[in-house]
Amino acid sequence: MSENVRLPRPFRTLAFIACVLGGTVLLASWAGSPPRITVEVVLLAVATLLSENFSLPLSKYTISLAYPLTIAAVILVGPSTAAIVAALSAVSLQDFRSNTSPSVMMFNMGQLITVTVVGGWVYGSLGGASLLESSVLGGASVGAFSLPTSMIPLTAMAVVCALGNVGLTGLAIGALGRQSLRDALANVTWLIPSQFALAFVGFLIAQVLAISPWALPFFIAPLLVARQVYQRYAQLKNAYGDTVRSLVGALEAKDAYTRGHSERVADYSLELGRAMNLDSRSLERLEYSALLHDLGKLAVPSSILSKPGSLSDTEMDAIRDHPSRGASMVAKIPPLRDLADNVGKHHEWYGGGGYPSGVSAAQIPPLALILCVADCYDAMTTTRAYRSALSHEQAVIELQSCSGSQFDPLVVRAFVEAGIGLAWDADLPGDCSSAHRAPVPAFEQATL
Amino acid sequence: MIQAIGQAHLGSWSLSVSWTTAFWFLLAAFVLDLFDISLPQGDNIGVSGALYAASLWVVGPFQAVAVCLGATALAHMVRWGSKAGYRLAGVATARVAAMGVTYALVASSGLFGPAIGAVMAVMVPATFLMVEMSVAQIEASLVAHHPIGRLLTGNLRIQAPLLLAQWSASVLLILTFSRMGIWSLVPVVALLLLMRQSYALFLEIRETYQTTIEVLVEAAESQDERTLGHAERSASIARAIAMRAGLTASQVETVSYAALLHDVDALAASSPQESSDSKRGKSSAVLEEIGFFSEVLPILRVCDGCCVSQDDYSRDEFMAAMIVALASDADVADHPGMASIHHGASVGRFSRFVPADVKAAAVSAALSLGHKTQAVY
């Protein structure tokens, strides 16, 4: 996040608290046990710096490989020295190059030091030994303790570090005000299992370093492969929505009257979903449902879609069949299978009597009720072969008059209260599509 | 350290000749095999090779073969049930062959004395993994009649990072086994599962793209029963020709997308008249703005007749375009009803710009699969 964008006060306060907390726990841990710089620690520090400068930027936070290295440092030399490795994992040339706000860097460093020292303290309190210290103090050979005896402290440390890191990062994203705290936490909690696995990788790194520090390069290939493949996945996943938008747009372009319809419905639906306080997962499902809601209509001949006069029974059947056809097509895409019901029921009415099956609210998925309003609003405010476009005000009056019969009253109320459609220029569909995609700063997320 | 392990154990062959240790290896390998990622062509992306390679060094040759056969059979039977037979035979053959070659290598290393131990601890996993992959690719080439040379080099290039990662994990297991005993399996399996999980997510999203595009094209094609299924059939034929011509897996995938989308301009046309306008042919223009298709676009541009000389595109792009056009022509030839309305990729539109040897390779691959092709000049 560049300097010229002023971060919200709650975030700056959180960054200050994290920084002070990090500094306090660091000094407290050094008072109890001064840091010990060994060859292993230097190697870990160098590896951490390198991994940070090749970290993987995701949309809201950053994934790096520093986490297992920090865990390894705790196991090797204890938390007071590991805190230095943790602090280094918050130093990235990329941050300086991109003028990342000092508040973000302060937050990252503070939270990583705090989480590492607290995790290390839990590890030590539950009987977890430091590999190099046990050698010095107890005269035991390096790496003498086994995984079974370290399992409980290691697991406890993994839990504390994963929850602390994920929780604080989620809190920070929430404090930025770009996402609700619930969404922010939901967006990062899926990282917990991989963080847990990486804690065991950290244990392996510690063991290998204790045996021979020069064996550290053997970790490069597995961790880099995992990260590179994950990076390609993240890129493809981020681009999926845009690809579907573009492709649907290209295929819809054949009909002058419905050109851009699905994209606009997706944007109205997203605004409605936000106004109704849906979580981010539901918003994503809503967006994909909206983009694909008229998939079945692609199969309807243009001659029917653009027919100016009244339709014959056969032609009307073809139109009325499009939600079911669309649903069966969406069901063929495995990860989107559960969206088929939204697509199949977006022409059902809240009070019953819609098509294709005439069911009422109880049997209609909530996202389909939102789609229904967004779809009808766009249909009303664009020119069709059989009538000219209504104004925004006329369309809203129509929505309100059909509220409770065709449309869900809650959705209509949210539509009106949020002023959806007011800012749209019917001649420039899609211009606001990127309005909700403001960039957010990168965060440290020390996991794969 | 590796040298110490080698010196201590070359004489007795392994670190721990124990059936109990072998059992834990079998269990861990079974878990990893159970979560192998199956690819559409019947190929697998697995990470268990790291454990099999290390088991050869850690538990000894007989136990390692038992681990290999036991875990492979168990995982295949759990996953595929009665359909396991063919797959199981192929995978087991590759792994046992790899064990045999690696064993021969290590056995002969005794001639060079214990100083060679460190090198051997590194060479054992490398040999096992390379031989396993090579045998698997030879099997695949025999089944599908692919040229082995290009298939092997292509797949080696693609799988090199995964092989390197497995090799590293294997060496790490050998390295830590002497200190941690069987518990060294826990963090190594965690590391392998992380790699596996990344691949699984990546393949899942790739499959999502492919099915989404297939579904969208199918939806648009449904307008006219005469063209329904042409894109998917062309993609299927193009994949077969591309594999026969020895293209790499990623090239085959790109060719498949290009074939699927070669008529997208007709699908996006506003009227049947427009869609059958033989002068149009601008599928690449329809997809120009979509970043995901950046590798497909040059192929479609060639198919659209946008080239004016041999220097405009690379040999691979000409080859891919030839395959797409041959596949489309073959499908049109098989479905005579389409001939009058199909305007899309056709060899005749651009073949004069294609290098002669590329033309010959693509056409001979198509002919060898029994597809009809028009005369290519």
Image (cartoon, helix red, strand yellow):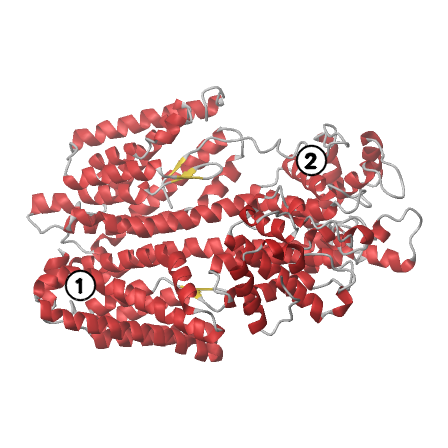
The residue indicated by pointer 2 is: A430
Could you classify mark 1 by the number of other residues whose Cα lies within 10 Å: few (under 14), some (14-19), or many (20 or more)? many
For the residue pair B155 and B351, the one nearer the viewer reads as B351
Mark 1 lies on a secondary structure that is helix
For the residue pair B276 and A304, the one nearer the viewer reads as B276
Across and down, in percent, residue B286 comes to 67, 46
Across and down, in percent, residue A297 comes to 77, 53
Residue at position x 32%, y 46% in the image: A158
Across and down, in percent, residue A45 comes to 24, 37
Residue at position x 8%, y 61% in the image: B115
Residue at position x 43%, y 55% in the image: B199
Mark 2 lies on a secondary structure that is loop
Residue at mark 2: chain:
A
Q: Amino acid at mark 2?
A: Gly
Give the left or right position of residue B116, taking residue B144 as reference.
left
> On the image, which quarter does residue A109 sit in?
top left
Image mark count: 2
Residue at mark 1: chain:
B
- Residue A338 in sight here: no
Which residue is outermost to the left?
A: A139
Give the left or right position of residue A101, taking residue A438 as reference.
left
The residue indicated by pointer 1 is: B120
Instruction: Answer above or below: position of A19 versus B250.
Output: above
Give the left or right position of residue A214, taking residue B372 as reference.
left
Q: Amino acid at mark 1?
A: Met
Quadrant into which the C terminus of chain B falls:
bottom right
